[in-house]
Image (cartoon, rainbow, N blue to C red):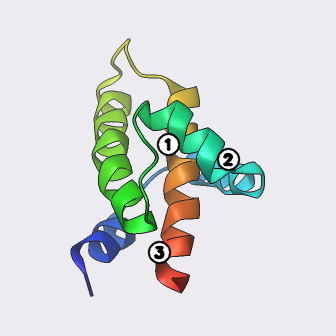
Amino acid sequence: MCRITKEINSMRRPGLLIEAAGHGTALYERRRDLRRMLRVAIPSTARAALEKLLPIEADLEKRRREGATSYSLTRHVDILTALLAEARSFRTG
C-alpha cells in the first residue's frame, strides 16, 4: 500500500463533512475545480493532485479542530470533494 493510500485510509473526519463532499463529487469537474482550488497548473495525474490536496486538507482540518477564525467550511468541503474524486480516480487508474 502506497503512502497516499495509507494517508487517505487513515483520515477521520466528521460524517457530515464527508457526506457533503461525497455529494459534491457528482458535480466535480477536474479542470475547472482543481484550477480554482489549487491556483496552479492542473496536475497531470490523480497522484500529483492528491499530493497537492492532502497537505491543504490537513491544514484545514487542523484549523477546524482549533476553532481558528481563518477556517473556511466551504473551502474544506471543496478540498475534500476534490480529494475524494481524485482518490477514486487514483484507485481505478
Q: Name which residue lies at 41% across and 53% down.
A: 43
Image x and y of residue 3, in percent:
22, 74
Image mark for residue 45? none
Of the two numbered discs 3 and 1 on the same chain, state the one appearing first in sequence: 1
Circle 3 Cα neighbour tier, 10 Å, few/some/many (<14 / 14–19 / ≥20): some
In front: 1, or 73?
Answer: 1
Residue 8 position (above or below residue 80): below
* Extreme residue in the left direction: 3
Of the two numbered discs 2 and 3 on the same chain, state the one appearing first in sequence: 2
Q: Which marked residue is nearer to the observer: mark 2 or mark 1?
A: 1
Q: Amino acid at mark 2?
A: Ala
Q: Which marked residue is nearer to the observer: mark 3 or mark 1?
A: 3
Q: Which residue is mark 2?
A: 20
Question: For this view, does 39 lie left or right of residue 63?
Answer: right
Disc 3/disc 1 C-alpha distance (Å): 16 Å
Question: For this view, does 38 lie left or right of residue 74?
Answer: left
Disc 2/disc 3 C-alpha distance (Å): 21 Å
Q: Name which residue lies at 69% across and 50% down.
A: 29
In front: 62, or 55?
Answer: 55
Question: For this view, does 39 lie left or right of residue 16?
Answer: left
SS category of the residue bearing label 1: helix
Q: Name which residue lies at 43% across and 30% down.
A: 39
Q: Amino acid at mark 1?
A: Ile
Of the two numbered discs 2 and 1 on the same chain, state the one appearing first in sequence: 2
Q: Amino acid at mark 3?
A: Phe
Image mark for residue 79? 1
In front: 37, or 72?
Answer: 37
Residue 26 position (above or below residue 41): below
Residue 88 position (above or below residue 49): below
SS category of the residue bearing label 3: helix
Q: Which residue is mark 3?
A: 90
